[in-house]
Amino acid sequence: MSYIQEQKGEIGLMTYNKPLIEQTAEFVRQQLAGAEAGHDWWHIHRVWNNVKLILQHEQADHQICELAALLHDIADSKFHGGDESLGPKVAGEFLSRLHVQEDSIQHVQAIILHMSYKASLGDVAFHSKELEIVQDADRLDAIGAIGIARAFHYGGFKNRELYNPEIVPNLRQDKETYKNSTAPTLNHFYEKLLLLKDKMNTNAAKQIAEERHAFMERYLEQFYREWEGY
Ligand code: ADP
Ligand code: NI
């Protein structure tokens, strides 16, 4: 597949004396050039920062968490024909080239495969403290002011309606229904964004989520007010 070949070309150009995390960040930034703005390098950068913040309050393997945060959207399945194995594969190939230990590579790959919201709606077969932390970090970026911006940007990218009072949110979605939804962006708040606060794993993320959640509720109130014309 040409995507993988391109990846190898990029890796071939890299120097091997830089610290692992820095080199990974550089690789991800190159790979995500031109990506959809809600899943671009700056999303990764924010998730990476969130991970570092949560790690101040949690005991876990920092290197695994940071690598997984950096690589978690390297080939997101929703932009690659639904292929959920491509992200872990690209990440694994990259880390092997940097001679990262095999068990660490497998852990990072397992986190990437299991951390998405979609994955959490299916059968969950893997669990680790590091997964919990990176998942929280990613979910924090889906809520609050940035979460709102990302949702409407993604909706625009998919040409979804902003809101349609005739299409009600579907609160009982399985993984397939969720993935194939074409509903207005406002429905996504009820189908995912407002549910995330109660799905946080760590106490640090729960606290940050409270404030971001309250902000989304205020936003929705104002949205409906303006919709009705007052
Ligand atoms: P994950 O990548 O964790 O599985 P999603 O694919 O559900 O999560 O979405 C990641 C982000 O993309 C969401 O937080 C949101 O900003 C945006 N997004 C995904 N699906 C939708 C949608 N149907 N409407 C609006 N935004 C969406
Ligand atoms: Ni992400």
Image (tube, rainbow, N blue to C red):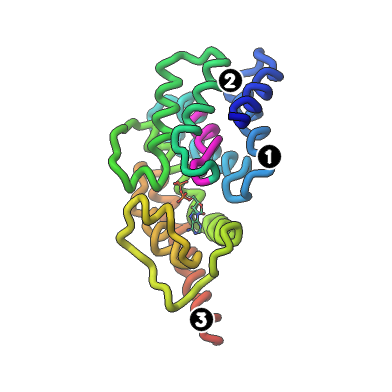
- Point out which mark residue 129 bears: none
Name the quadrant containing residue 149.
Answer: bottom right
Residue density around tag 3, few if under 14, some if 14–19, many if 20 or more, within 10 Å: few
- Residue 122 or residue 135, whichever sits in front: 122
Quarter of the image with the N terminus is top right
Q: Residue 182's x, y, as percent?
A: 47, 62
Residue density around tag 1, few if under 14, some if 14–19, many if 20 or more, within 10 Å: few
Of the numbered discs 1 and 2, the one sitting upstream in the chain is: 2
Which residue is denoted by mark 3 in the rendering? 225
Q: Nearer the viewer, mark 1 or mark 3?
A: 1
Q: Residue 6's x, y, as percent?
A: 65, 27
Gap between marks 1 and 3 measured at Cα: 38 Å
The answer to whether the beta carbon of the residue marked 1 is less than 8 Å from any atom of ligand 2 is: no
Gap between marks 1 and 2 measured at Cα: 20 Å
| Residue type, numbered disc 1 | Ala
Gap between marks 3 and 2 measured at Cα: 50 Å
Residue at the spot 45% in from the left edge and 62% down from the top edge: 188
Pointer 1 and pointer 3: residues touching (CB < 8 Å)? no
Whether 72 is among the magenta residues is yes
Q: Residue 85's x, y, as percent?
A: 45, 33
Under circle 3, the secondary element is helix
Q: Residue 39's x, y, as percent?
A: 57, 46
Q: Is residue 120 left or right of residue 146?
A: left
The answer to whether the beta carbon of the residue marked 2 is less than 8 Å from any atom of ligand 2 is: no
Quarter of the image with the C terminus is bottom right
Which residue is denoted by mark 2 in the rendering? 20
Which residue is denoted by mark 1 in the rendering? 33
Under circle 1, the secondary element is loop
- Residue 22 or residue 7, whichever sits in front: 7
User: Which residue range is magenta in the image?
Assistant: 67-78
